[in-house]
Image (cartoon, rainbow, N blue to C red):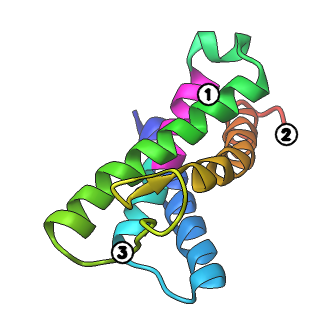
Amino acid sequence: MRKKLLRFLVLFVTGGFSYVMLELIYRKRSHISMFIDGGICFYIIDLLCNRFKKAKQMSLYTRGLLGSAVITGIEFITGIIVNKKLKLKIWDYSKLPLNLSGQICLGYSLLWYILSLPVIAAGNLLIKKAAGKI
């Protein structure tokens, strides 16, 4: 139980910190909801792409698509809550092509695919370290 909690915390904090840092570098600003999103995404991607038995049988390409879908889905849910319901206007993709309600768009989903690959690798590294293989 302790190892699972520690793993969750490491993944959550790493994902949250990484996402906020990317936003600060790219947009020069971020929001606490992005820390939470990054942490949740990092954990779920690791869970789906590294720890389920079927994940080991999937290609890296397929796991990247799964990671992109996770990030895009969480971004959409968060966008509906923080941008539409709470009207915080943290981001707006409405001027970008192929967007859905201004909360997600195909261009960023492709970026999330690329960014999910190092997340998958980091989760694998954490698994190996925990097993004493590093």
**Magenta stretch contains residue 54:** no
Disc on the earlier residue, 3 or 1? 3
The residues colored magenta run 41-51
Kindly indicate whether the residue at mark 1 contacts the one at mark 3 (C-beta within 8 angstroms). no
Residue 69 at x, y = what percent? 52, 37
Circle 1 sits on which residue? Answer: 49
Real-space Cα separation, disc 3 to disc 1, in angstroms: 26 Å
What separation in Å lies between label 2 and label 3 (alpha carbons)? Answer: 33 Å
Establish if 37 lies above or below 34. above
The structure residue drawn at horizontal position 24% and vertical position 78%, both measured from the top left corner, is: 88
- The residue furthest right is 134
User: Quarter-wise, where is residue 89 in the image?
Assistant: bottom left
Secondary structure under tag 2 reads loop
Q: Which residue is mark 2?
A: 134
Q: Quadrant of residue 86?
A: bottom left
Q: Amino acid at mark 1?
A: Cys
Which amino acid, by three-letter code, is at mark 2? Ile
Q: Amino acid at mark 3?
A: Ile
Question: Residue 91: x and y, percent?
Answer: 41, 73
Q: Mark 3 highlights which residue?
A: 32
Q: How many marks?
A: 3
**133 lies left or right of 57:** right
**Within 10 angstroms of label 1, few (less than 14), some, or many (20 or more) residues?**
many
Quadrant where the N terminus sits is top left
